[in-house]
Image (spheres, rainbow, N blue to C red):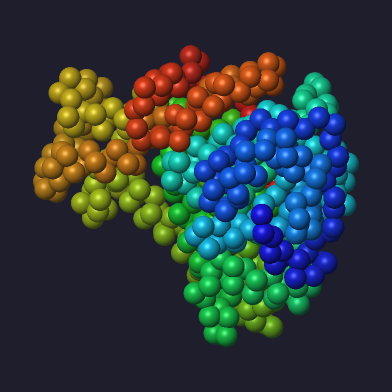
Amino acid sequence: MKFNNTYHQLGDKFYQSAIPAKVSNPTLLLWNDTLAGNLNLEASFCRDKLALAQYFSGNKILTGSEPVALAYSGHQFGQFNPYMGDGRAHLLGEVCDKGNTQRDIQLKGSGQTPFSRRGDGLCAIGPAIREYIMSEAMYALGVPTSRCLAVVSTGETVYRELPKPGAVVTRVAASHIRVGTFQHFAARADVESLKALTEYTINRHYPTIDIKADDYILELIKAVGANQIELVVQWMRVGFIHGVMNTDNCAISGETIDYGPCAMMGVYHPGTVYSSIDKNGRYAFANQPNIAQWNMARFAESLISLIDEDNEKAVELLTPIISQFSEDFNNAYYAMLATKLGVHDLSLIDKAFIKELLDILQNQELDYTSTFVQLTHSLSDVEQAENLKISFGKWYNDWRTLLQDGKIDNNTAQALMQVNNPVVIPRNHHVEAILTECETSGDLSRADRFLQVLRSPYKQLPHTSEFQDLPEDGDVNYRTFCGT
Ligand SMILES: Nc1ncnc2c1ncn2[C@@H]1O[C@H](COP(=O)(O)OP(=O)(O)OP(=O)(O)O)[C@@H](O)[C@H]1O
Ligand SMILES: [Mg+2]
């Protein structure tokens, strides 16, 4: 790996040097060969499992890496916490991938750092494998996301409610700059660092923005907002609930990061929430766009000092950008739902008509993913069409008429639906069963099988049916926990 360490150039207010903890018995559990290839890792290195376990547990440091823990702050469930930062993660540095993009390589669960506060700096096997499986699934689903290169068990015990085997997960991300990174410097009134961070972010993620233009900060806010819209629309296309959309878990690049208490919605209900700590449903399925907008407001706020010396004037310039978010989201969201119904152009279908289908799903307590798969099949399967006519009544006939009137033939509609409606998602009960199996027996064969299926989520492979069944209780009792 050839490390670039460009983040280090921002200076020591941005990070603390930190060496990953030594572990007693590192064993490679999962290795992402395709991603390794994309990061230009040598094949001979990738075959040496013992060496990989040493390097990706943090026991040995790769040549050229200067591990650091990054500084950031954040709003956690709406409350600002100025003292956060990587308390259990070490950024090894950046590596250039095949697409010529710099990717952060970061160990998570790799021991205490100066930001650990009272935390142990560790991660249990379950949450580490969850991060790997979920991010790989999301990547294959076509959702912007960080990915995982490796999971290494450490041989150490991690104490949660019960003692658990420990692990380190290696995350690969466009960067780990968060809304909370900007808030960190804004809260300290450190305008110089804020400016350096802004310029670094533009160079790295939004290079088409002209730093010399007067309105470059406003342009950055618009661009980050547009990426958040795309991100949350894609989450909602596949039924993903992030679970902890705190500003410190909101990546400026527009990728999904932090697969802590995330889950997939089964039965459609806008209020679906699985996280045990989200008592008020702040991060419920259909509240995600509101929160994304709220996070963008916090992002914009953190940049006020760079927009205008006159605060009021800066706020005046920012307000319309943030207000515009809801309308832009709404259009992108319904355009996405239209594609799930085989319609490529939102002008051919009413938003109210789409909403009617969601209401049917909610009232009849139907599974989100399988309903869209059934709709897709019904275009070429008469029996399926008859069944849906019975359950959806007039709405189904109106949909078929709408396709005809829009001159969208069944094959074209079906092809569009097939690439927007996954046949398989990482259903919560399967994820949990696999994590338990990995944790108790150390057997990863089923995790591998699951990953094989999840890597082709729009195709019915021979093993896909093993993972398509719905949870017996409709996930009503399902709860996720922060893996801390
Ligand atoms: N076991 C731990 N030891 C020390 N710090 C921790 C631990 N778990 C979480 N933290 C810190 O608490 C804060 C919130 O944690 P959160 O669960 O959002 O992040 P995370 O899952 O650790 O990491 P990331 O956001 O990078 O995926 C972060 O500052 C994180 O570093
Ligand atoms: Mg986090």
Q: Residue furthest front?
A: 44
Q: Tell me the residue at 62%/44% (across/down).
A: 44
Quarter of the view holding residue 197 = bottom right
Give 405 or 121, whichever is nearer the viewer: 121
Residue at coordinates 26% horizontally, 43% vertically from top-left?
416
Q: Quadrant of the N terminus?
A: bottom right
Residue 158, percent from left and from top: 82, 29
Question: Is 455 rendered above or below residue 89?
Answer: above
Residue 303: give x, y in percent of width and height. Answer: 66, 71
Compared across the picture, whether 235 is left or right of 7 comes to left
331 to the left or right of 326: left
Asked if one can make out residue 242 in the rendered structure from this viewpoint, the answer is no
Q: Quadrant of residue 422?
A: top left
* Vertical placement of residue 384 versus 95, above or below: above
> Could you say where residue 299 lies in the image, as x and y percent from the top left?
63, 63
Position of residue 95 relative to residue 333, above or below, is below
Q: Is residue 59 left or right of residue 135?
A: right
Where, quadrant-wise, is the C terminus in this rendering? top right
Is 117 positioned to the left or the right of 81 in the image? right
Which x, y percent locates residue 370? 36, 27
As rendered, which of 381 and 440 lies closer to the eye? 440
Q: Residue at 41% of width from left, 21% of height from top? A: 463
Q: Which one is in front, 340 or 78?
A: 340
